[in-house]
Every structure is written in C-alpha cells, then in structure tokens.
C-alpha cells in the first residue's frame, strides 16, 4: 500500500489474514476473510448499460468469479456495469465482528449479493477481495466450484484428500492442503480463487462425529468423521487480487 493510503490498520490486518490463509492452501478461505491472488489482466469492459437504476440490459445471466472484476474497479464502474441501485456503499463483514467500508452488490437480492473490499476503504480504490456467502447464490467460481458443493464432491474432483481447519470458529473451514490434486490452482494464475467449508446443515445440531470442530487441521479421510463428506460443504466463495505494490 502506498504512503498516502487512507486504509486503516484493521483492513490491512484483515487482508493479511486473508492472504496467509490463501497462501497456505490452493483455494481456501477463513470465515472472516477469503482471499485470492492478484488478477493482473482484466477482461474486456462490459457493454454500456441501458437503464441506470436497475441491472443493465444485455448482461449475461451468468454470475462467475472472477469474471470482469479487476483491481481497478470503482463504485462508478460498478454502477455502470450493474446499475445504480444494485451497488450500495456500506459496511462489509470482517473477522470477529469487525466491519469495513466497502460495497455490497445486489443488496436486496440474496441470489446475487456479493461483498467487495478495497485496499483504500475510504476512497474505495484498489479492489482486493470479493466474497459471497449466501446459500442460494447464483455466483460460482470459474473453475466450477459452487456454493453447497459437498466435501465428498470436492474430494472426488480433486482426486486426493483435502485438509482443512476444524469448523466452528472464525477461520474454520479453511482449506490447508489439496495434496497436489486436480483442484490445485496453476502457479501462474494472477487471481486467487478461494472457498471455505462449513456445515451443510446449519439449522440442526450435528452429531459429535459429523465433522471436525476447533482450531486443528483435519483430513477429509479422517476415520473419526466417517460422514463428513456429506455433512461438510462449501459455505463461502471468494476471489482476491494483488496489492497495488504488486500491480
């Protein structure tokens, strides 16, 4: 971050926590932050919108991350892309109850809602992180990972066990090791895609052996949790970009 930035220490620590979690695994993400690596090349600019108050006409119904998101996104460019009323400046959630100034996309629609974090949270410049954690979201990662996908499905796609931190705390469900499986991202990809695990059923109390809980690291092959494959699922998706010093 450059010397004139107005980002407060909290958001810097939050971003660092995200990066540490992401770097410790190929796609993983802490509950309070789910990062992703830099995106050095953005896609072509979207078509100009027709209405300025709703969702611009002619946009694809596909909601894919990273898609057109890039570090140079601003409130103005987001409103041109999604429509004025679909881009709200406000508090976005951080770790342990902390909040930051950011942008909420589609604030009134859980199927399209996303939370955007910026390096400079006052000027809202330098998009660094996009998070999605609505169970009914249409958003998905461009590698096919989608909300609600079970741990068993992920392991099948990966072809190897998946290690992750126990559930039930702020950084629970962070993937720590994909064991060089098929889900391991290529090393030359600028954008880091992340996903966080959590209980598939959040409405009912789980049995003690339904899935691991706590700050330790556990394997999807751990025999102590024989049903974790169907009890654990993707509960958050995110992408993150480099700091401005890395651009």
Image: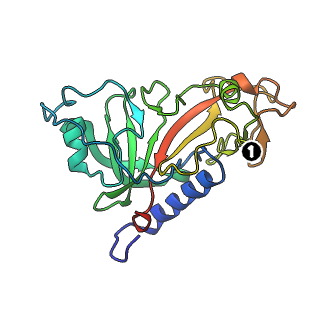
How many numbered marks appear? 1
x 61%, y 27%: residue: 202
Q: Secondary structure at mark 1?
A: loop
User: Which percent across, then down, holds residue 176?
Assistant: 69, 47
Residue 245 or residue 17, whichever sits in front: 245
Is disc 1 surrounded by few (<14), some (14 to 19) or many (20+) residues within 10 Å? some
- Residue sitting at 46 percent across and 68 percent down? 9
In the picture as drawn, the residue positioned furthest to the bottom comes out as 3
Percent of width and height locating residue 71: 36, 54
Picture residue at 63% right of the left edge, 36% below the top: 183
Q: Residue at x 60, y 24 (%)?
A: 203
In this view, 4 is above or below 207: below
| Quarter containing the C terminus | bottom left
Left or right: where does residue 191 sit relative to residue 47?
right
Q: Give the quadrant of the N terminus.
A: bottom left
245 vs 68: above or below: below
Left or right, 20 with respect to 136, comes to right
- Please identify the residue farthest to the right as the structure is shown: 223
The spot of residue 83 in percent (x, y) is 20, 36
- Camera-side residue of 181 and 99: 181
Classify residue 4 by image quadrant: bottom left
Looking at the picture, how far across and down is residue 22, in whole percent? 59, 51
* Residue 40 horizontal side relative to residue 77, left or right: right
How is colour applied across the structure in the image? rainbow
Q: Which residue is mark 1?
A: 214
Residue 63 sits in quarter: top left
Q: Is residue 219 left or right of residue 242?
A: right
């Amino acid at each position: 971050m450059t010397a004139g930035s107005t980002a407060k220490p909290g958001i810097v620590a939050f971003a660092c926590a995200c990066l540490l979690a992401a770097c410790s695994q190929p796609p993983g993400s802490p509950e309070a932050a789910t990062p992703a690596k830099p995106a050095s090349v953005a896609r072509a600019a979207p078509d100009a919108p027709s209405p300025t108050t709703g969702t611009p006409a002619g946009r694809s119904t596909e909601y894919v991350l990273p898609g057109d998101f890039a570090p140079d996104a601003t409130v103005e460019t987001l409103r041109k892309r999604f429509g004025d009323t679909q881009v709200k400046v406000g508090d976005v959630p951080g770790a342990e109850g902390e909040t930051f100034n950011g942008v909420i996309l589609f604030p009134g629609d859980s199927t399209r809602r996303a939370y955007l974090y910026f390096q400079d949270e006052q000027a809202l410049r330098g998009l660094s992180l996009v998070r999605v954690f609505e169970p009914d979201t249409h958003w998905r990662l461009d590698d096919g990972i989608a909300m609600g996908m079970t741990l068993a499905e992920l392991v099948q796609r990966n072809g190897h066990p998946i290690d992750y931190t126990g559930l039930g705390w702020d950084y629970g469900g962070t993937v720590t090791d994909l064991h060089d499986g098929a889900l391991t991202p290529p090393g030359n990809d600028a954008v880091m895609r992340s996903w966080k695990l959590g209980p598939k059923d959040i409405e009912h109390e789980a049995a003690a052996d339904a899935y691991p809980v706590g700050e330790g690291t556990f394997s999807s092959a751990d025999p102590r949790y024989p049903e974790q494959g169907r009890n654990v699922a993707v509960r958050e998706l995110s992408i993150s970009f480099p700091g401005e010093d890395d651009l």
